[in-house]
Amino acid sequence: MQIAFSLFVFVSAILCLVFVAGAFYVYLVAFRADHREIDESILTPADANVKIGKDRIHFLISDILDTPHEVVTIRSFDGLELCAKYYHHADGAPLDILFHGYRSASCRDCCGVFRISKDQGHNVLLVDQRAHGRSGGRIITFGIRERHDCLSWINYAVERFGKEQKIMLIGLSMGAATVLMASGMEMPRNVVGIISDSTYTSPRDIVLKVSRDRKYPENLVAPLAKAGAKIFGKFDLDETTAVDAVKNCKKPVLFLHGEDDFFVPCRMTRKVYAACASEKHLVAFHNNGHCANYVFNTERYVNEINKFSKEMFSR
């Protein structure tokens, strides 16, 4: 009997160690970020469809990098130094705050909307999300902690530019999920609208979707991702979702997504759109991949954003 019990304890301990090791691996792959210099692998999108427009993307990125700016920093709610670049056009102009996607760079993901904001004569705050670029941190939480950073940047803008400063939040991919998750929290009246390009429904959904794409068993990845986030990342993967957050949203939202997005499927935006309780508008772009709407459907993309932006800032 004692031998059987000892064997049970031994096997249980081995299984626990294997599970924890698996959770650590998922944590490293999905949530852990190691800062690196901006290079070709970041600036050139992996999406084969977008590679066709690589030259144009590089031109837009160069425009951002060559535009005079001020590097600004704030302290996050949990003590990280967060960094952004501020591009000043005119005193009193509307302010667009831009948020990039997962393991990417602000100058790449936001190059299209930056050009739109610049052409509109808006001031721009181009944010490096936590664990990206010059911002501190080593853990990517898919919008769960980033939503608090979004509110911190809004508060920074209001404190710096005044209580009458009008603000538009614009996010792409994880940046879109970030601003939508933030929309479920109390926001200053300065925020007049939100533009979401290619959001996912929840951190869990996108982690599992990518794991399915890579042929990993979902029933195994789900508990490992949950445990890895909790044990090593110190956050709850299911703390909030874009779907739940927008049920409490009070700001007008423009939803944008490419119908041929195979990384973050358009159906995810449709689900978030359906749950959104505020004024909303959805625009789907046929034949466009992930965050490729500006490059391949420029006129329509620009017109939709300009129309929404002009209406919101004029209220």
Image (spheres, grey):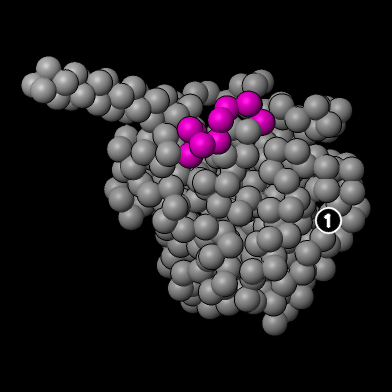
From this viewpoint, is residue 270 visible?
A: yes
Residue positioned 89% across, 49% down in the render: 286
Q: Quadrant of residue 178?
A: bottom right
Q: Nearer the viewer, residue 115 or 2?
A: 2
Residue 309 position (above or below residue 140): below
> What is the x, y in percent for residue 136?
39, 38
Task: Examine the rendered structure and indicate whether residue 35 appears above or below residue 99.
Answer: above
State left or right for residue 72 relative to residue 57.
left
* 32 sits left or right of 255 in the view: left
Q: Amino acid at mark 1?
A: Ala
Q: Position of residue 75 (x, y in %)?
A: 34, 51
Q: Residue furthest bottom?
A: 315
Instruction: Give residue 284's quadrant in the image.
Output: bottom right
The secondary structure type at the circle numbered 1 is strand
Instruction: Tell me what residue is drawn at x 69 percent, y 43 percent.
Output: 264
State yes or no: residue 93 in magenta.
Answer: no
Magenta stretch: give its range: 213-222
In the displayed structure, does residue 139 sit left or right of residue 261? left
Vertical arrangement, residue 314 with respect to residue 265, above or below:
below
Residue under label 1, please give it: 284
x, y percent for residue 294: 82, 46
Instruction: Name the quarter where the N terminus is drawn.
Output: top left
- Residue at the extreme left of the image, as rendered: 2
> Viewer-proximal residue, 216 or 126?
216
The residue lying at 24 percent from left, 26 percent from top is 12
Work out whether residue 154 or residue 263 is closer to the camera in this orientation and state it: 263
* Pointer 1 local density, CA inside 10 Å: few below 14, some 14–19, many at least 20: some
**Quarter-of-image position of residue 82:** top left
Q: Tell me the quarter of the image containing the C terminus.
A: bottom right
Residue 123 x %, y %: 64, 58
Secondary structure mostly taken by the magenta-highlighted segment of the chain: helix
User: Residue 216 colored magenta?
Assistant: yes
